[in-house]
Image (cartoon, rainbow, N blue to C red):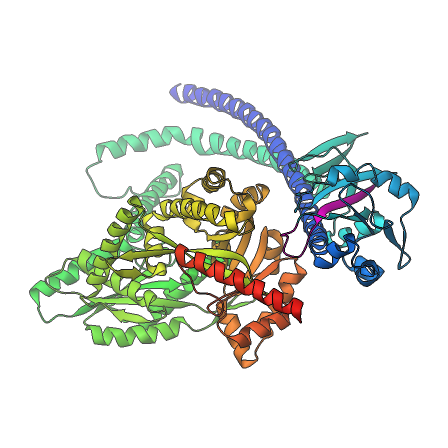
């Protein structure tokens, strides 16, 4: 009777649990399917929108570069003695000599107009047609003539451009006042360049950008306004992306369908079948588990539980006598208990070993150090040495190839280290790319020989997914001594390792007591730097950037200098301290403030003077960099073009995605970026094309070989810059041979000791006066000749 009642209860409970779980699984499956479909569809839409947005950015970037080149050519012609003399009537052959059809085609100019200040034409407007200059058609002149007055201003030294539409074809006209080469005479007239934005011109840009865009008419906007919308035309989803050209009555448009429609459909189908299959499998599995593995065994499990409660103090296993259900359950319980014991041992192993590499971890090192330190107490002659090893350049490989490659490298290094030690030595991974080896019975001299051998073994090249790689490391060694704690030993080895990195990496250094003095000096300098920043005691020196063709100054580079108790602290040293201590943000803000104030005063006499300011990665991370820079130019009434911002190539390689949004924001405000030390780091043409850099700075390491007539690298860098429409500045130029070679290769902007060293503001003012006098003298000599 009891057995029958028990079976009835079990059967009723089984049906109820089966129905309830079936309903729950179906409900969860439907909810999961709906949410997943919504998220996947949203994800694909975001991808499509990003795809078309990137196409627009590429198109507008090419438009801006093309327009800048167009306006630059207009300025070159307008601010020219020959043009001024023509307007004044003193150069009658000016047009025949300078405005050939070939010359205009090279700068993509379809026509030009030269007027007096009152708007009357100096000569008949001309356009290029069939490789000849012909008078401008009357219909085109009728379109352009009403626009010309709005582009005229006697004090105008910068270009003003407009786009006029006729028959759905854009006509771009840009105008600027005419003056002499030095822009120190009143305007004598106006020069206007005309570019017809027809399909021939647009097809050239389409081939360059690989984007099938359209140029359409729109209202003029001072800012670039973009939109990406999805349209549903008779069930066909289409994307329409538009982006306005800054200050021009036109916008670019890209239209297309869903970029990954096949993948979208396949994903939805796979999701549907996966949810249906998992729901069905879950129902069957739950039925089998509940009915056969739970309910039928509850009664037996209850009896076994009573037995186990009565013998809980006993350590014996449950007896297994046969093959019935009770024996199977007993066997399962016995295996479960055995597995718990094994897992306990595994947890103990995991607590002392690194899960990735399988070698020891920091906890194991601490335990071994305790044992060895106790051994030193008992046996004073016992010797052992701790090695701390840090991989050089691991972060760049890890970021460049991915975390899977980083894990592979860490495992490989662990294997190489383990293969070189004895069975009694301890190899551990402390975290990241930092390792440690505790050598038993080895003095520092023997440990140093071992470390040198280990470095060679680590540096052996290896391959990963077709990439041939090699890695180096820096090692610090510290002996265990009775008077030291284990924390002291680890600190000493750490100081020795950083000394190895300071000496150039890929070497082993044994700890010396004077390393503590280095740490002490760094601490003192950090405190002194903090006080110096509070008192604003850091100075700004400037190094001019020269146009080697005429000796004229192009701009300046601002350099921080710090004098402490009559000692000039090297910039690399105190800037490194500022970055690691977090003071670089405050230092950067003071640099902007001092440069802004001094540049404002200098531009009274030199209105076009520009200044380059170096940025640190920490400034992007720890402050609102855009706000700091905007406050500077607003406070000192400077245009954005007066400040150029310099980034090193290593910064871009390390944190491109992190700093790119701030760069793009600053570029929208009119600032320009220079890429410093180009060629020394991890350069790529793709990065140069995608990042908003205006200028490349060629490192001195490529300039020096010019003295030995080795110009391969410099020539390639200059060609890359010219192909991308970027300016070029050569750094560290010190000899006349280097200057002449750079001019021959097409780089005329020079920064280096040959022209000027870095100097404080007072010396700079004197230098600027002397340089202006030299320019005037040279110009006078040329006129007399």
Q: Is residue 551 visible?
A: no
Relative to 360, is 28 above or below? above
Find out whether residue 184 is within the magenta segment: yes
Q: Measuring from the top left, give residue 600's x and y in whole percent.
A: 48, 45
Q: Measuring from the top left, give residue 540's x and y in whole percent.
A: 39, 53
Find out whether residue 651 is within the magenta segment: no
Q: Which residues are magenta?
A: 170-185
Residue drawn at (52%, 31%), measured in percent from left and top? 287
Residue drawn at (50%, 75%), measured in percent from left and top? 735
In the picture, which quadrant includes the N terminus?
Answer: top left
Q: Nearer the viewer, residue 702 or 77?
A: 77
Relative to 676, is 624 above or below? above
Q: Nearer the viewer, residue 764 or 344?
A: 764
Relative to 262, is 704 above or below? below
Residue drawn at (48%, 58%), measured in percent from left and top? 768
Q: Nearer the viewer, residue 467 or 111?
A: 111
681 relative to 177 in the view: left or right:
left
Q: Measuring from the top left, give residue 57's x and y in whole percent.
A: 66, 45
Q: Measuring from the top left, give residue 208's x and y in whole percent.
A: 74, 55
In the picture, which quadrant includes the C terminus?
Answer: bottom right
211 relative to 714 in the view: left or right:
right
Q: Nearer the viewer, residue 435 or 522?
A: 522
Q: Is residue 77 visible?
A: yes
How many numbered marks are there? Answer: 0
């Amino acid at each position: 009777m009891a057995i029958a009642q028990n079976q009835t209860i079990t059967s009723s409970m089984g049906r109820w649990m089966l129905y309830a779980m079936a309903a729950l699984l179906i409900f969860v499956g439907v909810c999961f399917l709906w949410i997943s479909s919504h998220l996947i569809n949203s994800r694909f839409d975001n991808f499509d929108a990003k795809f078309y947005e990137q196409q627009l950015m590429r198109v507008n970037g090419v438009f801006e570069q093309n327009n800048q080149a167009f306006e630059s050519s207009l300025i070159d012609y307008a601010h020219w003695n020959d043009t001024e003399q023509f307007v004044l009537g003193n150069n009658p052959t000016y047009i025949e000599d300078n405005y050939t059809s070939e010359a205009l085609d090279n700068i993509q100019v379809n026509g030009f107009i030269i007027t007096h200040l009152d708007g009357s034409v100096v000569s008949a407007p001309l356009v290029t047609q069939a490789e000849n200059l012909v008078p401008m058609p009357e219909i085109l002149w009728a379109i352009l003539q009403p626009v010309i007055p709005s582009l005229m201003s006697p004090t105008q030294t910068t270009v003003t451009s407009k786009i006029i539409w006729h028959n759905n074809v854009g006509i771009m006209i840009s105008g600027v006042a005419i003056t002499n080469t030095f822009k120190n005479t009143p305007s004598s007239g106006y020069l206007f360049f005309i570019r017809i934005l027809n399909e021939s011109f647009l097809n050239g840009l389409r081939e360059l950008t690989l984007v099938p865009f359209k140029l359409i008419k729109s209202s003029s906007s001072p800012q670039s306004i973009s939109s990406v919308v999805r349209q549903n035309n008779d069930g066909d989803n289409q994307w329409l992306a538009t982006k306005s050209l800054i200050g021009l009555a036109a916008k670019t448009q890209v239209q297309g369908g869903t970029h990954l429609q096949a993948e979208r459909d396949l994903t939805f189908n796979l999701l549907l079948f996966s949810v249906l299959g998992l729901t069905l499998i879950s129902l069957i599995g739950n039925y089998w588990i509940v009915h056969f593995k739970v309910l039928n065994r509850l009664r037996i499990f209850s009896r076994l539980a009573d037995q186990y409660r009565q013998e809980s103090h006993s350590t014996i296993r449950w007896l297994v006598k046969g093959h019935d259900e009770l024996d199977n359950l007993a066997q399962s319980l016995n295996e479960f208990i055995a597995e718990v014991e094994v897992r306990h041992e595994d947890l103990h192993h995991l607590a002392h070993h690194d899960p990735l590499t399988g070698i020891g971890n920091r906890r194991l090192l601490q335990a071994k150090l305790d044992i060895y330190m106790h051994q030193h107490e008992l046996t004073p002659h016992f010797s052992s040495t701790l090695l701390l090893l840090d991989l050089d350049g691991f972060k760049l490989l890890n970021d460049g190839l991915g975390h899977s490659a980083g894990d592979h490298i860490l495992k490989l290094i662990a294997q190489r280290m383990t293969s070189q030690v004895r069975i009694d030595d301890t190899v551990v991974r402390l975290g990241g790319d930092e390792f440690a080896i505790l050598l038993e019975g080895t003095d520092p001299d023997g440990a140093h020989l071992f470390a040198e051998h280990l470095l060679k073994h680590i540096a052996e090249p290896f391959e990963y997914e077709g990439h041939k790689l090699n890695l180096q490391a820096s090692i610090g060694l510290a002996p265990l001594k009775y008077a030291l704690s284990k924390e002291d030993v680890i600190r000493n080895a750490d100081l020795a390792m950083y000394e190895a990195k300071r000496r150039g990496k890929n070497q082993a250094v044994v700890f010396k007591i004077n390393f503590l003095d280095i740490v002490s000096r760094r601490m003192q300098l950090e405190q002194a730097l903090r006080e110096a920043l509070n008192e604003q005691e850091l100075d700004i020196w400037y190094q001019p950037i020269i146009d080697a063709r005429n000796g004229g100054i192009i701009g300046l580079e601002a350099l921080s200098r710090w004098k402490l108790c009559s000692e000039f602290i090297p910039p690399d040293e105190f800037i490194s301290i500022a970055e690691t201590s977090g003071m670089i943000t405050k230092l950067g803000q003071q640099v902007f403030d001092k440069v802004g104030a001094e540049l404002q005063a200098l531009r009274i006499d030199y209105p076009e003077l520009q200044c380059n300011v170096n940025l640190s990665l920490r400034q992007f991370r720890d402050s609102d960099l855009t706000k700091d820079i905007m406050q500077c130019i607003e406070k000192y009434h400077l245009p954005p073009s007066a400040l150029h911002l310099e980034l090193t190539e290593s910064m871009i390689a390390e944190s491109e995605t992190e700093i790119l949004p701030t760069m793009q924001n600053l570029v929208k405000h009119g600032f320009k970026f220079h890429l410093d030390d180009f060629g020394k780091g991890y350069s790529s043409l793709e990065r140069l094309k995608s990042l908003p850099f205006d200028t490349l700075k060629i490192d001195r390491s490529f300039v020096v070989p010019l003295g030995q007539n080795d110009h391969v690298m410099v020539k390639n860098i200059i060609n890359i810059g010219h192909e991308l429409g970027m300016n070029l500045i050569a750094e560290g130029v010190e000899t006349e041979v280097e200057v002449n070679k750079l001019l021959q290769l097409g780089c005329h902007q020079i920064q280096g000791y040959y022209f000027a060293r870095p100097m404080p503001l007072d010396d700079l003012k004197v230098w600027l006066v002397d340089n202006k006098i030299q320019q005037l003298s040279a110009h006078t000599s040329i006129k007399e000749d």
